[in-house]
Image (cartoon, rainbow, N blue to C red):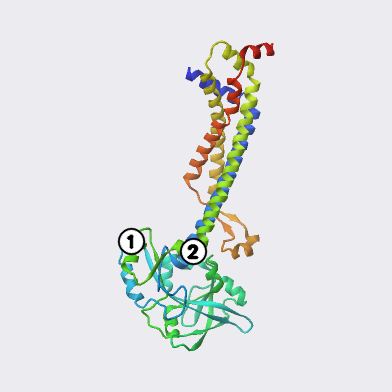
Amino acid sequence: MFRLILKLAWKNAFLRLSRTLLVVIMIAVSMSMMLSIQGIYDGMTSNLIDKTKRSDCGEISLYNPHYRLNKNLDNVIKDAKTIEASLNKRPDVQAVVRRLSVDGLSATARKSAFSSVVGINLDEEIAFGRFDKFLVEGKLELGKRGVLIGKELAKTLKVHVGSKVIFSTQDSSGEINAMALKIRGIMQTSNVVLDRSALYVERRHLERFLGVSDTVATQIAIRTAYPTLQATLQKAYPQLSVMDFLELNPMLKQMQDMMSIFNSITFFIVILVVFIGILGVMYVSVLDRIREFGIMRAVGMEYKYIRREVLLEALFVGVVGYVVGAVLGLLSLVYLHHYGLNLSQFSEGLAAFGLDTVLYADISPIYFINTFLAILSASLFSVLLPLRKIKHLNPIEVIKAET
């Protein structure tokens, strides 16, 4: 009996081929667009998070407990060099960098801006977060007077590669000191704070300029794949502030939550469209075959068999639409993952939010699993109204009306 019902359901699902194909196309196009949007949203967020980790804090960062409230040279990590060496020996740590940072004023002959000089070791930064990938102009070199400058800060100061910048700040003795720097390269990390304010110099030259020991640092950043490492380090270094990525970047967490909300809204709209589409097809199909169902009831066919046939019809339409949509969505995601969505005409606005001009999509199996379950549910719920019509059908009246 089930095989007979299965054949009837398949035949009736495509009895009105043009109508069914229209719904299948609607499901497929809606689904592929939803998958593309979800992939772009997730890719945009994960790209921001990845670049922030690589350029700044990693998964975990260590600070003097008072540094983030009062960023002066009194609030540094005193034994940073020893701590860095100890962390590098841990098997659950992938990479470590220590940085020395100080706030001050950058000036040219015509422009000035508040900024921060960050003392780094280029080799360590490249190993830590592929720092060389952030270079957009010039050369990745520092030297005694060389400096790498954030792209937005370069725009503010109206400087370019080869320009000179004077940076002044208070050194460890409390005196105002200044140094002349020559721009070797321009960096774009997509970290808004760094791109707007950062000047990168050799750490050892900054140490001499500030008059501090080479054992101190303002930040020790760590890359790790172990979420339990933070708790371990908090016990190991109770005198320091051990903070994870989300604690240091609450705005990115909020952005991630907002993107999840946008994805949920898009998902709901698409599933609602699928539900209405299948409901319309199934309801019209039942009305077209109302005499057929009346005869089936009149000759003694139980309602449960008719119900199974109608359910299978809806599932066939939904599954075919899903398969076509999954293929289109996968092709779209693969293209966006490799080539991205070019929004260079909005580069200024995107840069203000730390976004790249080319947005790349993520691809995750969960997109397709969730969509399949949702379309399956929409297909099943869409037949409730048609089934109600059949259940309350009076076979004799239907047959008489048709004759």
Residue 152, quarter of the rendered image? bottom right
Question: At which x and y percent is residue 162?
Answer: 57, 79
Using the rendered image of the protein, determine whether residue 138 is visible from the camera's viewpoint.
yes
Q: Amino acid at mark 2?
A: Asn
Say which amino acid is labelled 1.
Answer: Asp
Q: Residue at x 48, y 47 (%)?
A: 364
Q: Which residue is mark 2?
A: 249
Q: Residue at x 63, y 19 (%)?
A: 289
Between 261 and 37, the one nearer to me in the picture: 261
Residue at the image position 54 percent from the left and 48 percent from the top: 333
Which is in the foreground here, disc 2 or disc 1?
2
Q: Tag 1 or tag 2, which sits nearer the N-term?
A: 1
Question: Which quadrant, please, contains the C terminus?
Answer: top right
* Residue 295: x %, y % from top left: 60, 13
Residue 37 percent across, percent down from the top left: 58, 49
Q: Is residue 348 above or below residue 79?
A: above
- In the rendered image, residue 18, in percent from the top left (x then y), is placed at 65, 29
| SS assignment at label 2 | loop
Mark 1 burial class by Cα count in 10 Å: few <14, some 14-19, many 20+: some
The residue identified by callout 1 is: 92
Q: Are marks 2 and 1 in contact (CB under 8 Å)?
A: no
Corner quadrant of residue 149: bottom right
Separation (CA) of disc 2 from disc 1: 23 Å
Q: Secondary structure at mark 1?
A: loop
